[in-house]
């Protein structure tokens, strides 16, 4: 797993170093798994049809605090004039903190994201999207669905 993560970090770094990022949209999402989360991120166009999408999500578990930081790439396939589908691959950082009887404990994990998403452009400045993603995080794997809006400026 460490070799896979190292190779993925190297590939992401190489692509990011050579890419010319162009801001595409601000993304706001609701995230559903066994609990609920709210996410905010951006979509940056790197190459034609390839987007970089960093995102911060705050989850509301029954105990403690959880957040996730994603750094994903999307390769867009135009399937109709206003519809796109895209596979998702990227990195995830997961944090869970809890305090019990005055004792604090934190769990931090680094993992890999894989998934698929779709976007519908409602207008030139507004789009809606849905993504299904699985995050492989050692002993803390997570699968979730995100539904949100893209706001283009």
Image (tube, rainbow, N blue to C red):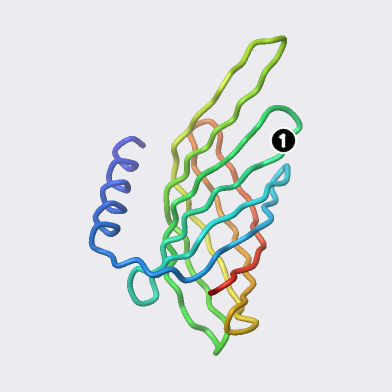
Q: Which residue is drawn at 64% across and 11% down?
A: 103
At which x and y percent is residue 51? 42, 67
Figure disc tally: 1
Image quadrant assignment for residue 100: top right
In the rendered view, tell whether residue 35 sits above or below residue 42: above
Q: Which residue is drawn at 43% across and 66% down?
A: 44
Give the residue furthest to the front.
153
Which of the pair 37/22 is nearer the observer?
A: 22
At which x and y percent is residue 128? 64, 72
Q: Mark 1 sits on what residue?
A: 61
At which x and y percent is residue 16? 29, 58
In the rendered view, tell whether residue 117 sits above or below residue 82: above
Give the residue furthest to the bottom.
81
In the rendered view, tell whether residue 3 sits above or below residue 53: above
Other-residue count near label 1 (Cα within 10 Å), few / some / many at <14 / 14–19 / ≥20: some
Query: In which quadrant is the N terminus drawn?
Result: top left
At which x and y percent is residue 25? 52, 69
In the rendered view, tell whether residue 145 sits above or below residue 81: above
Q: Residue at x 59, y 30 (%)?
A: 96
- Badge 1 element: loop
Give the residue furthest to the right.
62
Q: Is residue 102 left or right of residue 85?
A: right
Q: Which residue is drawn at 43% across and 57% down?
A: 89
């Amino acid at each position: 797993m460490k070799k896979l993560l190292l190779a993925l970090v190297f590939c992401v770094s190489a692509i990011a170093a050579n890419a010319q990022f162009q801001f595409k949209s601000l993304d706001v999402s609701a995230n559903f798994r066994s609990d609920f989360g709210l996410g905010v991120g951006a979509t940056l166009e790197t190459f034609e049809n390839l987007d970089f999408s960093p995102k911060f999500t705050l989850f509301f578990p029954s105990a403690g605090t959880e957040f996730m930081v994603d750094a994903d790439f999307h390769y867009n396939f135009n399937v109709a004039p206003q519809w796109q589908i895209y596979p998702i691959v990227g990195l995830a950082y997961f944090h869970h903190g809890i305090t019990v009887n005055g004792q604090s404990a934190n769990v931090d994990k680094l993992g890999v994201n894989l998934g698929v998403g779709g976007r519908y452009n409602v207008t030139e400045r507004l789009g809606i999207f849905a993504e299904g993603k699985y995050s492989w995080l050692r002993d803390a794997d997570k699968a979730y669905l995100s539904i949100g809006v893209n706001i283009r400026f």
